[in-house]
Image: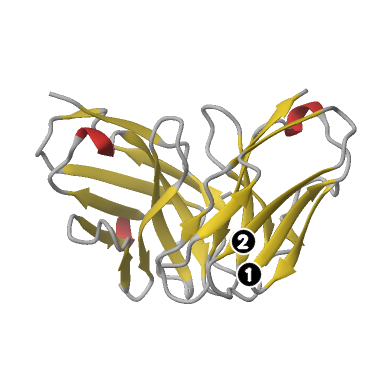
Amino acid sequence: QVTLKESGPALVKPTQTLTLTCTFSGFSLSTGGMRVNWIRQPPGKALEWLARIDRDDDKFYSTSLKTRLTISKDTSKNQVVLTMTNMDPVDTATYYCARTHSNSWDEFDYWGQGTLVTVSS
Amino acid sequence: DVQMTQSPSSLSASVGDRVTITCRASQTISTYLNWYQQKPGKAPKLLIYAASSLQSGVPSRFSGSGSGTDFTLTISSLQPEDFATYYCQQSYSIPPYTFGQGTKLEIK
């Protein structure tokens, strides 16, 4: 059974750095083709893909946010970490992690429940 | 980046209706098009991948079609549990991946 769960602070102040952790089970990032992504959704708005990390540590980022994002993994702990610097109120959103795999169409087949992050002083 | 445009942005329909949602890509994406359903307060759920492949466990009243730049999601006979927001998403080539702006399906 594949599960993912996001964790991190519910509230951050403007200019601070956000660190979110995705802890997953039922698959391993050491398995060929496995990938973990981060996606966010501001309240009442559409989904926005943020970043992806692959088994071989290849990393990909949103064009508009790439200067603020860093994604990393700890394969032994089944965790993927996303950091976002210089947080702003417009970054208030629910942040999701989701799995994709290269032996399919890179569809997001499993998602975490999401974690709401509010940026406010 | 590939831009995804969904239409309509909102739609009112009745139980039993046949509904179609369209999604257009700003450049060709072959069949690298996926559809998701999202209910309030919940994570999105994968419905269709590779433009027309039904995800395991998804009812057969959902179907997808298209290739290149134009795609459709069809619900053949709306059920009460289908009222939700639907998103298309392209996964063509190297990221960034992009989503459509969503279509909110409401009860008439």
**Mark 1 belongs to which amino acid?**
Thr
Packing grade of label 2 (10 A; few <14, some 14-19, many >=20) is: many
Residue A11 lies, in percent from the top left, at 22, 27
Q: Are marks 1 and 2 in contact (CB under 8 Å)?
A: yes
Is residue B41 visible to the viewer in this orientation of the structure? yes
In the foreground, A69 or A32:
A69
Q: Which of the 4 quarters of the picture holds residue B83?
A: top right
Picture residue at 57% right of the left edge, 43% below the top: B102
Sequence-wise first label, 1 or 2:
2
Of residues A73 and A102, the one nearer the viewer is A102
Q: Could you say whether the residue bearing mark 2 is in a helix, strand or loop?
A: strand
Q: How is the image coloured?
A: secondary structure
Q: Work out whether disc 1 and disc 2 sit on a shared chain.
A: yes
Q: Secondary structure beneath disc 1?
A: loop
Q: Is residue B98 above or below residue B10?
A: below
Between residue A75 and residue A44, name the one nearer to us.
A44
Q: Which residue has dot 2 on it?
A: B24
Above-or-below relation of B90 to B46: below
Residue that appears at 28% across and 58% down: A64
Left or right: A75 in relation to A67: right
Q: Is A42 left or right of A87, judged from the image as shown?
A: right
Residue A58 spot, x, y in % from top left: 32, 74
Binning the other alpha carbons within 10 Å of mark 1 as few (below 14), some (14 to 19) or many (20 upward) gives: some
Residue type at numbered disc 2: Arg
* Depicted A69 relative to depicted B10: above or below: below
Residue at figure coordinates x 53%, y 72% from the top left: B92
Q: Chain of mark 1?
A: B
Image quadrant in which you'd find residue B18:
top right
Q: Quadrant of the N terminus of chain B?
A: bottom left
Q: Which residue is mark 1?
A: B69
Which percent across, then down, holds residue B101? 52, 46
